[in-house]
Amino acid sequence: MRFDNPLANINAAIDPAQRQAMANAYAPIIRAILVPGCAYYVFITWSHWQDETGLDLAILASLSAITALCYYLIRKYAVTGATISLQRLELMGVVMSALMYLNVLTYLTIHFEQSKLVYFALMAVIFSTTGVTLRGILFSVFASLATLYWFASSLSHEIFTQYVSIGVATAFASFSMALLLRKAILQQIDARLLADKLAAKAKRLADTDMLTGIPNRRAIFQRIDYLVEQRRPFWMGIFDLDGFKAINDVYGHMVGDRLLCAIVDRAERIDFEGATFGRIGGDEFIAILPGSLTGAEIEDLGKRAIETISSPYPIDLLQLTVGASAGFSHFPSMGHSGAQLYEKADFALYKAKTHYRGQCVLFDTAEDQEMKQAIEIERELREGDLDSELFLLFQPQYSPTQKRVVSFEALARWQSPKLGLVRPDLFIRAAERAGHIRRVTDILFKKSLAELAAWPQDISLSFNLSAQDISNQTFILSLLGQVMESGISPSRLEFEITETAVMSDLENSRTLLEQLRASGCKIALDDFGSGYSSFEYLDQLPLDKVKIDRSFIRKVPHSTTSKEIVAGVIGLCRKLDLRCVLEGVETEPEMDVLSKLEPDLIQGYLYGRPMAAKDAIRMILEQDGNPVIREHAAHSA
């Protein structure tokens, strides 16, 4: 039958972490012994100089002096530092014990004194408490007690028997003390290692995105703060998925979560040494790229990443496709803190999503002032009393055939106590970027319904929706709910959208617009002709009206091409049974040329500037007695 060595099992059970923890636990014990040990052997050296002569002095004083010096050197150089290996500590412990043993052995060999044999028993006890490993303790205690028996063997049998008893008792005491001390230290080590392991696990969980397993916002910004503190240059890139929300809404969160994991798996395979890729929330990700890369290299890397992300994903029986846009900022040339860099990368991302969807955009330092202004506007949007600060102006839409105003467009305005009157394009863009646009839309829509309720039944109102508004079914349904509660006929309401508002997710936008139209509301496409795919939207979207962009209207008196384009669109709208609005008509020469094209509706300063609600209702009430509204518009201007 085979028996295992229990001591071997104990040593084998110690893993590397435990070994290092043991070294850390025993190191203070060894350091504490070395200082008084050095002082003791300095004293012993002085005693030898006092008591010894000749060769005995040379041997004993030299040995004790060397011991004192070795103890000093070990304390100063060998066992210092935050981390000492267990093997090194064990070796230093053996050297200490060997020097101590040699001093006693040499002295008793030269000057044998029976009473001093007890020094070997005392050394065995010291070795048991200062020994770092069990094998070191066994060897040291065995050598000490064996030497005790060797010296005692020359004495009488009775005395030898006494020393044998002392040796046995010392052996039991030494091993018991060594095992108890070792057990206590190991228990402390196990408890500390467990605590460290739990702390590391908690930190890992705190720093990891639970869905994708990549670093989360907290971990990413810790990394950013570290790089900033070390003054190491890096690029920060924010990636936002295009079209993910629609997939999540249509196929559910389970499919959406799997898609996110697939996207992360693919993105992590992009080869860039030292890069950190993390998720900061929803469908937004962040990349940290250390090193001195040029802007061109970053644009190329961002382009490759977007192309990689945008390839189809086979999930179950589906082939899902999402796009991505990215914004980058650079440390230290574009900012000196993580917050500044994030703001600028986010600003570049918004620019990409607004004007260069599906591309990588680097922050332009020339846009610093624009970004600061946008941040200030965002803060006031968040903190201001928008219910009282937001208001509407109304611009009439004139029908040349009926010779009267038949509709108004509601135009958003904001009078901030701190910023003054803020341009609509600035605060609408800031609200979209900061996620406040639905709050703004909701407040303005309530005000629009309140004004429309006071107007005659044959006057309608056109209200603008943003890209974020028409991407959220719940919000669209809430607007319809307000219409139903108001008692206003849905046919009197017209929702205006732009090409950029629907281009990010045409399918989802069409679905929500169809719901609006099914309720009886009208849909108008604003700024027709300003984009690249206008005619595609005529075919794809459920439209009732088209508003030709003012850039064409202004050129009509001077450009035959613009005139023919406008005439062609007017004719196309008639054939498609769509109403057509000519925007930006400001002068009589423009109107003289346009009237020959038989336009459906005119909107511009010629027939009325944006006006307050009281002026709009005055125009409505007066117009039946004034067939030509132009004069009224001129006076109101």
Image (tube, rainbow, N blue to C red):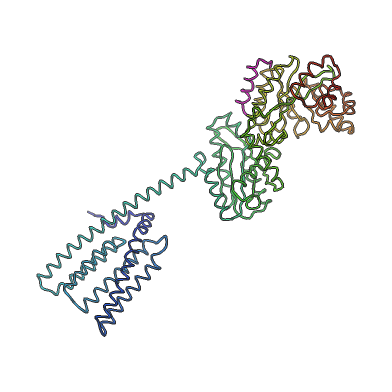
Percent across and percent down for residue 107 are 23, 76
* 201 horizontally vs 549: left or right: left
* 485 horizontally vs 412: left or right: left
Q: Quadrant of the N terminus?
A: bottom left
Percent across and percent down for residue 77 are 40, 68
Q: Based on the picture, tell me whether residue 57 belongs to the magenta stretch.
A: no
Q: Nearer the viewer, residue 175 or 636?
A: 636
Q: Where is residue 312, by image quadrant? A: top right
* 144 horizontally vs 266: left or right: left
Q: Quadrant of the C terminus?
A: top right
Q: Nearer the viewer, residue 146 or 533?
A: 146
- Name the residue located 17 percent from the left edge and 62 percent from the top edge: 169
Percent across and percent down for residue 550 are 81, 31
Percent across and percent down for residue 513 are 67, 24
Magenta: main secondary structure: helix
- Name the residue located 68 percent from the left edge and 16 percent from the top edge: 488
The single residue placed furthest to the bottom in the displayed view is 54
The residue stretch that appears in magenta? 472-489
Q: Nearer the viewer, residue 200 or 60?
A: 60
The single residue placed furthest to the left in the displayed view is 158
Residue 102 position (above or below residue 400): below
Q: Where is residue 404, by image quadrant? A: top right
How many marks the image carries: the answer is 0
Residue 632 position (above or below residue 374): above
